Image (cartoon, coloured by chain):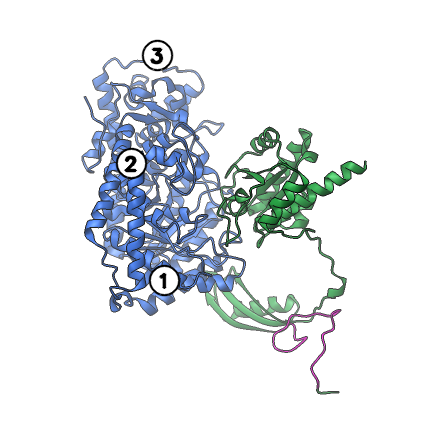
Amino acid sequence: MPDGPKLLDPTKVRPYGDDLGDGAVQMSFTLPVPYSPESAEAARQLARKLGLRDPAVVHGEDLGGYSFFIVYGHTRESVDVTQIRVEKIETNAITREAADEKIRRVFGRKLVVVGACIGADAHTVGIDAIMNMKGYHGHYGLERYAMIDAWNLGAQVPPERLLDVIVEKKADAALVSQVVTQRGFHKQNLTRLVELLEAAGVRERVILICGGPRIDHKLARELGYDAGFGPGSYAEHVAGFIIEKLIERRRLAATT
Amino acid sequence: MHLDLPPTKIARARDLAVAIVEPVLAQIQRHTTDSVERATLRLMGLEGATDEGVPYPNVLVTHLKARLGEGLAPLVAAAARDCQMSLAELARRVSLKVIDLRKYRPADPQAARTHAERLLRAGLRRIDEQIKAREDFVATLGQGPQPWLYVIVATGNIHEDVVQAQMAARQGADIIAVIRSTAQSLLDYVPEGVTVEGFGGTYATQANFRIMREALDAVSREVGRYVQLVNYASGLCMPEIAAMGALERLDMMLNDSMYGVLFRDINPARTFVDQHFSRMISAYAHIVINTGEDNYLTTADAIEAGHTVLASDLINERFALAAGLPPAQIGLGHAFEVNPAVPDAFLYDLAQALLIREVFPDHPIKYMPPTKHMTGDIFRGYALHTLFNLIGVATGQSIQLLGMLTEAMHTPYLMDRALAIKNARLTFHAARHLGENLELGRDSWIVRRGAEVLDQAIAMLEGVAREGLFAAIAAGRFADIQRPPDGGKGKDGVVPKSPDYVNPLYDLLAEKIDARRPETA
């Protein structure tokens, strides 16, 4: 055996601790039983059942009736990263100036974008980050775009009202934020909106986008949205997507 | 560690808050609301709901809507007496359309008033017993040192909340807040009974309050420390929740004079009338209110908008004093929300925390954790919470709402809360006397920053005083949110008092508290 560095086999990728292929993972969890040597052993056995080799319960404590554990171990599993395909939003973020310029050139008018936190959800942090003038983390929101007419309806907007505003403002795109996800709450609201838009015959006239900390593009597509934006998305990603999608639709319309 | 702010400037800021709030108080005193009348009926002992779940207070207020301006307490008390039945039975028959009170006039208005007063005194006696029970608990068990560790439970199921709350108490929590189901603030009624399903929280109901209070009393005895209970007197049912909280011995209530207007689009007049009445009840019941200034920083930048927090704290303080709350019951809010990417972010937050502490020395101020800058990186978030806790203990905050490392992901798991308590205990233990061992240079950056934010707050208050609070809110001076005076939810529930309006509760509360009251003829 040569003494050189180990080479990564991309068809068999394992977590890395301090040795390529060691499969080291860390995890923590609560067991609904008091802390005792027996419950610590239960934590170790659980880790083994999860497939971890040499699990070590490095910490355990009582939480006042239940018990908390930190466990390290080594997985035997590996993944073939060469075979992975992820559904991604195919868009390139463009700067605000470039977006304004492109809208002016291609459409010759302002794009109308409405946004809301629908249903009972009261958490506006997401929609505000994308839409508000000030934006988030130094990324200005859509309200600051010269060529975007942005309407942020805020929190707890009934899907029916959002539909009315989409029709009334002749919106090019609608942004829907959902933060509360307990018991599938967000999916009910998001589905309801799509059903309303379809029933009103306007689904195809608007680019429908959802966003939130627990939302990804795949889920959004499954629910009937054009795109889903998760954490780390800013106004320029959303603006870029809207512009490209509108251009694509226009091209499709021209060829049929 | 002190900023040593000029007392003349702080006095100037307070004078401006008086000038801002005074005209609003005049308007408050000319109106009643659906929820004020429902809360009064609840304090008279009306509980229960129809088979369809419509609470009896709503049944009567809806039925007598055209006569709200007279004040419903004497009318309802006299009707129940004339019919020789309980208030609940009266409401039940009204809901079945067996009894119609819309044209009813008590034969003897003075007797009607006396009867309402008797029922209200019985309700206040229940509150008196709760005050006594709390005092006994605190005298025998004591309380933890400040900053108090304040944690949230939010499972949606009151029975699961109990499990989480009792364990949090055993881990060291001093205060348990049961987060409400999302959107409860916009319900124009208080749900009835025990609830086991909610979204992002658990419904505030009187039955749920009672279950959690009993559970915390039990665990208080076990851990040898009185554990306090918090809920939300906010939204369209603010006065009713305050009344229920007083009856069931909650110790703190989220209660802000402007939050509902700005962040829930509730009608401004509705909110101002409701908050005044709610605060009178909390003042009577020895309940500490918590205000929500942290919300200003959830979207606005914490450096640019730091002064809006202080300005709003001063307005909230003025409204609270006018409702009879002493400083010791006014838990004004502020937050640790400066973007950690900013160089010396910790110094900005430290200056802001010292500023609020010094302007409100006798108030149980409430320090809120970072939320806006929390991400899925729980390790980074946990480190940020250590910085937050260090400021909390070093600047002598009264109530420390502990951050959860999974803030950006889901409602707290049991272990998330346990880790938050561990972080706070470790930090407080390690630095309990840090603040009193440090002095800031008179020309240090932190001292100058504190003075700068105070100056900015004064300038803002001057502007609001010039244009008036309603106009300032309409112009988006607070949180960049514009709310016109005639807009918002619950507007139809605001009713001018007629010249013969009677609600004996105002007089009864005034026996114990020093609130500004409606001018009576």
Q: Is mark 2 on a helix, strand or loop?
A: helix
Q: Where is residue B142 in the image (x, y as percent from the top left)?
A: 26, 57
Residue with the mark numbered 3: B103
Q: Nearer the viewer, mark 1 or mark 2?
A: 2
Q: Are marks 2 and 3 in contact (CB under 8 Å)?
A: no
Which quadrant of the figure contains the C terminus of chain B? top left
| Vertical placement of residue B90 versus B312, above or below | above
B144 is within the stretch colored magenta: no
Query: Which tint was used for chain A?
Result: green
* Same-chain check, marks 1 and 2: yes
Residue B307 shown left or right of residue B113 in the figure: right
Between the C-alphas of marks 2 and 3, the distance is 46 Å
Residue B244 quadrant: top left
Tell me the chief SS of the magenta region.
Answer: loop
Q: What stretch is highlighted in magenta?
A: A4-23
Mark seen at residue B466: 2
Which quadrant of the figure contains the N terminus of chain B? bottom left
Chain corresponding to blue in the figure:
B
Counting other residues with Cα less than 10 Å from the Cα at mark 1, is it few (<14), some (14-19), or many (20 or more)?
A: some
Q: What element carries label 3?
A: loop
